[in-house]
Amino acid sequence: MVSDNFSIVLVFAVYLLFMIAIGVLYYRKTENLADYILGGRKLNSWVTALSSQASDMSGWLLMGLPGYAYLSGMESIWVGVGLAAGTYLNWKFVAKKLRQYTQIAGDSITIPVYFENRFRDKSHALRIISSILILVFFLLYTSSGLVAGGKLFNTVFEIPYQQSLLIGALVIISYTFLGGFMAVCWTDFFQGMLMVCAIVFVPLAALNRSLYFMIKSDIIRLIFHRV
């Protein structure tokens, strides 16, 4: 039991250090503000796709949604339908045009700056309002992700929740401040790969174990029936 716990702690420690190492790597590669905010617009499609979905889905997909599905039953399928439709429409009709027009509109590197440049707002009202909305709503969303990380550490390692929350926040803030956009995207990419593996292989392992016990019980019943 002790060796199992030590192995889990070691794996998580290596994982967290790997996240920080990515931040350090892109800190050294960052040369200007555009590199820090948008990675020089050089991110490839695979990392873009997986990192955006990992950021969007994150903790609530693996922790909140399964709990909701367990409690509500089949009606929760509409959550999946809405997510799939919304994601497809966003990438199909919004993403490409936004990518092009942000560059045309004064090479805007943030959404508030894009709104200001696109609509030629000299009062800066669009920039201020959109910045406040982003700050408020993403603060809430980011907080939910930190809560999920804190609960994970608390459950797996039995570390007090507040300390778990602090560890997760320090790691995330460290690689974000160090490497900016590219560090966040690449860490999200690797976390997204872990999420894909968890979503695919954990149900398969559970199904395999269930089939094993079903077959085992059928064999036992068959033996005792013949006896």
Image (cartoon, helix red, strand yellow):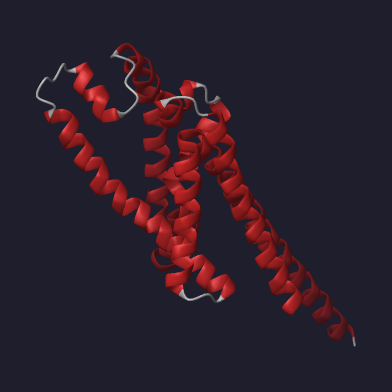
Left or right: 119, with 179 as reference point: left
The one of 207 and 42 positioned closer to us in this rendering: 42
Position of residue 195 relative to residue 22, above or below, is: below
Q: Residue furthest top?
A: 104
Q: Residue at x 55, y 76 (%)?
A: 158
Q: Residue at x 39, y 25 (%)?
A: 95
Q: Position of residue 63 (x, y in %)?
A: 47, 61
Left or right: 81, with 123 as reference point: right
Q: Residue furthest left?
A: 123
Q: Note whether residue 221 is visible.
A: yes
Position of residue 218 relative to residue 16, above or below, is: below
Q: Quadrant of residue 220?
A: bottom right
Q: Quadrant of residue 156?
A: bottom right
Q: Quadrant of residue 169?
A: bottom left
Number of numbered markers: 0
Question: Looking at the rendering, in which quadrant would you find the N terminus?
Answer: bottom right
Position of residue 88 relative to residue 18, above or below, is: above
Q: Position of residue 45 (x, y in %)?
A: 54, 26
Q: Residue furthest right?
A: 227
The one of 215 and 8 positioned closer to us in this rendering: 8
Question: Looking at the rendering, in which quadrant would you find the C terminus?
Answer: bottom right
